Amino acid sequence: MTTEPFASALASFAEEWVGGDIRGLHALATTLYGYLPEMTGITTALDREVSELTGGHGWRGPAASAFTAAWRQDAVAVDALAVAIARTAAIVDGLAVRLATIEKALEEEAHTAARYGVAIGADGRPPPEPAGPPASSAEASERHWARAYRQAYQRAMTDARQARQQAASTLRNLYATIEGAGNLART
Amino acid sequence: MTELQRVAGAFGAESVRFWAVMPPDGPAVADGGSPELDAALTQVLGAIGERRTRLAAVIAGRGRTLREVGAPR
């Protein structure tokens, strides 16, 4: 039913500069994965009940056959839902992992830049680019690191935006698949 | 109680369990950080919750079918 039953570990990070609730996304993936054993348990239990009911000298005839066929169709629909849940979990989990990695890398860049005197905003934004030449070699060094951090910040924001766009696109495709398979459950 | 009625009860109980696998409104959405992502996530989670509700009703319906078949005439 699923090849990835647990959410992945996240890179450690302290802030939320790249946006979104990364830990919340990770928790959502964990929650979704947690639904799967329960759903599998239900279909397994009912499969067993139907097998015992209709096996051996049990319930026979056209009504029994029709019931068994209908239940098999239901079980397929439940399985399809479980697959959709697992895919959603994988998409959300993958996004959380990517965002956490981007966030961690940005925080490390900020830490390095701050050591060279660059003033990092509380939201992780780099300082504005100053006009005119530096007044000292210390200021020149600070500007160098500020420039480097500015690039890192832009790269992080671009990467985070792309990760979200990809996740959104994959989720939209998954939604179309779920809706397309909807007839399975309409009995 | 006939075997049909017993299994009917199992379907009824499992339909309730199936419905209760996730919250009534489906899984809660986490803030993805962009309106586009949040909309897509909301859409998928809504579909999952809706499909869960529908399948729980289908399973309960199978139980009713068995109860009717197994009812004394």
Image (cartoon, coloured by chain):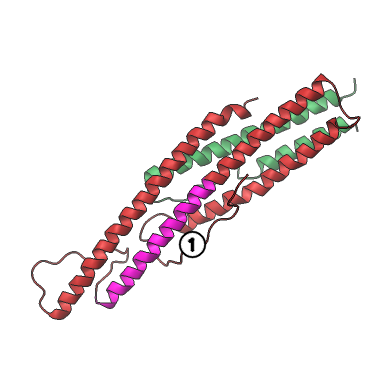
Tell me the red chain.
A
Q: Is residue A174 magenta?
A: no
Q: Is residue B36 above or below residue A18?
A: above
What percent of the width, then of the height, locates residue A21? 44, 56
Residue A157 visible? The answer is yes
* Left or right side of A131 for A81: right
Give amino acid for label 1. Leu
| Res A63 → quadrant | top right
Q: Nearer the viewer, residue A57 or A41?
A: A57
Q: Is residue B50 left or right of residue A55?
A: left
With A81 as the anchor, is A24 left or right in this view? Answer: left
Residue B61 visible (yes or no): no
Give the drawing colour for chain B: green
For the C terminus of chain A, give its image quadrant.
Answer: top right
Residue A167: horizontal and vertical position, in percent? 43, 46
Residue at position x 73%, y 30% in the image? A71
Q: Quadrant of residue B58?
A: top right
Q: Which residues are magenta?
A: A88-117
Q: Is residue A161 above or below residue B8?
A: below
Residue furthest left as drawn: A132
In percent of the image, x 68 and y 29: which residue is there? Answer: A73
Q: Secondary structure at mark 1?
A: loop
What residue is rendered at 49% in x and 50% in y? A92
Q: Which residue is mark 1?
A: A10
Q: Looking at the picture, how far across and down is residue A129, in whole percent?
A: 17, 64
Label 1 crowd bin: few (<14), some (14–19), many (20+), radius 10 Å: some
Q: Is residue A93 on the magenta stretch? A: yes
The quarter of the picture where the N terminus of chain A appears is top right
Query: What is the chief secondary structure element of the magenta stretch?
Result: helix
Residue B48 to residue A10: above or below: above
